[in-house]
Image: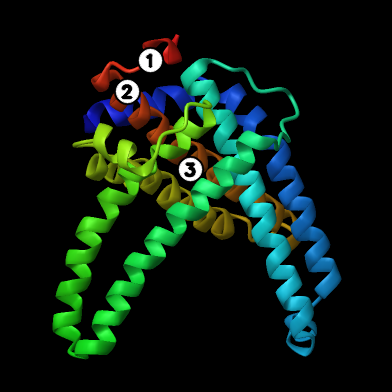
Amino acid sequence: MLKRLLSDSVSLVFGNLEAVFKVCGSWFVLQFVLMTIIQLSIGDSGRLEANPGAAVLLSLVVMIFSLVSSASISVAWHRFGLIGEQPGLIHLKFSGVEFSFVLKSLLLGLLMIGAWLVVMLIHFTIGAPAITGVFALLVMAFAIPTFFRFSLILPATAVERPIGLGQAYAISEGLGWRMFLATIILALPFVLGGMFIGYLLQEVAGGLPLLLIQMKMLVLNVLIQIIVTVLGISVLTAGYRMAMENRSVEPQVFD
């Protein structure tokens, strides 16, 4: 299962790089513009410290943008991977499907927060760090695979065949830890490689203007962020496909 998750995710992404940049490109350009406007507006952090209301508003804007953009990218990529729907050259779609995707994502986030609150409750109740650590490991050992199994509600929502948490858990037996490991295995080389390339770039760019170095680092970081993001989505796409194939449910979804 793990080998297929890895191979399916890698082939989906690197066999369709044009679709990757169509799905992500416009949102990442908007993200760059938004971050530039924010940086020019606030100048230094002192302005935000002097105006807590502005800091809250700024955080809210960034959070909403992140939810909207991630939902739009995820839905488009799941639909491309599962039903072959081709993204447009400029993809900035946000409709009812994407809104439902946001709600399901928030639900999953609340479930993970709930698991973390259990750990905190144990910590404050017992107090002993060693015992708290053991309980934390036990909770996370259950929460991590469960979270990934529950996450199959996301690709199901994207292709407009919604399923509940219970059904997602039932059809994904054996996939929880494997999806988690696949996500880590796929992301780690790009994160480490990006850090190494960034280090080399700084070392060999001694005579280059600071602005040019910063622009190169920005482009590198954006490319890595795009690839890592789509690889992570692709793991869920592949996991959902495998779960549905194992259950022999609606095979026409993958035509």
- The quadrant where residue 132 appears: bottom left
- Label 1 is placed on what type of residue? Glu
Secondary structure beneath dot 1 equals loop
Distance from Cα at disc 1 to Cα at disc 3: 29 Å
Question: Relative to residue 198, is residue 40 drawn left or right?
Answer: right
Q: Quadrant of the N terminus?
A: top left
Which residue bears the numbered disc 2? 244
Q: List x then y, in percent, for residue 20.
A: 58, 29
> Which tag, 3 or 2, sits closer to the chain's start?
3
Badge 1: residue crowd in 10 Å (few <14, some 14–19, many ≥20): few
Badge 2: residue crowd in 10 Å (few <14, some 14–19, many ≥20): some
* Marking on residue 250: 1
Distance from Cα at disc 3 to Cα at disc 2: 25 Å
Mark nearer the viewer, 1 or 3: 1
Q: Are marks 1 and 3 in contact (CB under 8 Å)?
A: no
Badge 3: residue crowd in 10 Å (few <14, some 14–19, many ≥20): many
- Label 3 is placed on what type of residue? Val
Question: Does 203 sit above or below residue 79?
Answer: below
Q: Residue at x 51, y 43 (%)?
A: 229
Mark nearer the viewer, 3 or 2: 2
154 or 87, which is in the foreground? 154
Question: Does 207 sit above or below residue 234?
Answer: below
Q: List x then y, in percent, for residue 237.
A: 42, 30
Which residue bears the numbered disc 3? 228
Residue 72 makes an appearance in the image = no
221 or 185, which is in the foreground? 185
Q: Are marks 2 and 1 in contact (CB under 8 Å)?
A: yes
Secondary structure beneath dot 2 equals helix
119 or 77, which is in the foreground? 119
Distance from Cα at disc 2 to Cα at disc 1: 7 Å
Q: Residue at x 60, y 23 (%)?
A: 19
